Image: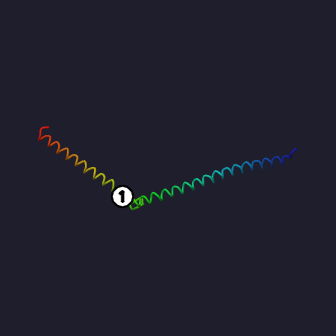
Amino acid sequence: MPTPTKVVAADADASLERELAGLKNTYDRLRDDKVRTEQDLRHQQNQLAELEAKARADYGTAEPEELARLLDEKRRENARLVAEYREHIAAVRRDLDAVEQDFGV
């Protein structure tokens, strides 16, 4: 028959083994997460470098502030062009209305 001291020691050993197994599982999961995160980081860095190169090629810069300024300029230019086109259409409409009036259409 085992002595109470041996039973307590065996229980403590079994508890430590279970804890060690749990810690090993946690370590393995964390290591896998680290590997995936590093791969994701490399992928994101590569994608960023590609996008920066494309921005430099297309717009002459990859600086976010400069790109935002260029975008704002393009938006203002588009608004101006739309306003000009709107006025042109209104002038065509006025001219058409005048022609219709002159010919009683």
Quarter occupied by residue 71: bottom left
Q: Foreground residue, 13 or 100?
A: 100
**Percent position (x, y) of residue 56?**
41, 61
Q: Would you say 69 lies left or right of 104 here?
A: right
Taking the view exactly as shown, the residue that stands out farthest to the top is 105
Residue located at (30% from left, 51% from top): 79
**Percent position (x, y) of residue 55?**
41, 58
Tell how many labels. 1
Quadrant in the picture for the N terminus: top right
Quadrant in the picture for the C terminus: top left
Residue located at (50% from left, 58% from top): 46
Taking the view exactly as shown, the residue that stands out farthest to the right is 1
Q: Foreground residue, 14 or 64?
A: 64
Disc 1 target residue: 70
**Percent position (x, y) of residue 49?**
48, 59
Q: How is the image coloured?
A: rainbow
Residue located at (75% from left, 48% from top): 15
62 to 8, vertically: above or below: below
Q: Foreground residue, 9 or 54?
A: 54
97 to 20, vertically: above or below: above
Residue located at (62% from left, 52% from top): 32
The residue carrying pointer 1 sits among few (fewer than 14), some (14 to 19) or many (20 or more) residues within 10 Å by Cα, namely some
**Percent position (x, y) of residue 47?**
49, 56
Type of amino acid at the residue the image marks with label 1 = Leu
63 to 25, vertically: above or below: below
Secondary structure of the residue carrying numbered label 1: helix
Q: Would you say 69 lies left or right of 83 here?
A: right
